[in-house]
Image: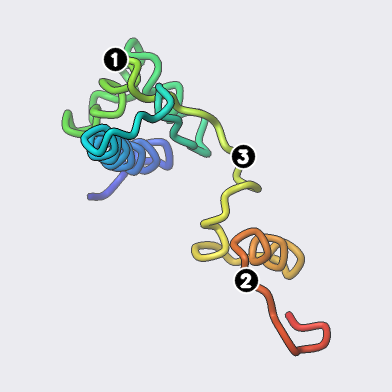
Amino acid sequence: MVALSTCEAEYIAGSSAACQAVWLNSVMEEMGIELEKPIELLVDNKSTIDLANNPVSHGRSKHIETRFHYIRYQVNNGKLKLIHCHKQLQIANILTKPLKKERFKMLRERIGVYIVGIKGGC
């Protein structure tokens, strides 16, 4: 899939994450485990959150394939809640972006990876 904007790329990724979250929720319910509702999905793009929360923004989204509006459907049904997560808090950035040394060290620690036995290791 080729996205025409960052917002569209995040929207598509969010829709995929929404599918997985709803599926995992149904698996947990079948096992007798109740999760807090609505499921919270962290998104680092405010335009994506606005697009999912506001169906009136048709002009900006009419080129997005219908299958990707699953996220909007789940938000409107109250099963999913999108929460803005600042890009500085995105742990996945350690795997996807070039980072300055201090930021890399901080994210590395947040995922539980430590250098043992190397004095002042990177």
13 relative to 48 in the view: left or right: left
Q: Earlier in the sequence, mark 3 or mark 1?
A: 1
Tag 2: amino acid: Val
Residue beneath label 3, please? 86
* Residue in view at x 31 percent, y 18 percent: 59
Q: Residues within 10 Å of mark 1 (few under 14, many from 20)?
A: few
Contact, CB < 8 Å: mark 3 with mark 1? no
Q: Position of residue 56 (x, y in %)?
A: 34, 10
Categorize mark 2 by other alpha carbons within 10 Å: few (<14), some (14-19), many (20+). few
State the CA–CA distance, disc 2 to disc 1: 39 Å
User: What is the basis of the colouring in this image?
Assistant: rainbow
Task: Indicate the amino acid at tag 1.
Answer: Asn
Query: Which circle marks residue 77 in the picture?
Result: 1
Looking at the image, which residue sits at the far front? Answer: 32
Image quadrant for the C terminus?
A: bottom right
Q: Which residue is mark 2?
A: 113
Secondary structure type for disc 3: loop
Observer-nearest of 108 and 70: 108
Amino acid bearing label 3 = His
What is the C-alpha distance between the residues marked 3 and 1?
Answer: 25 Å
Give the number of the mark in front: 3 or 1. Answer: 1
Q: Position of residue 71 (x, y in %)?
A: 30, 28
Q: Report the residue at 26% width, 49% height from top.
A: 2
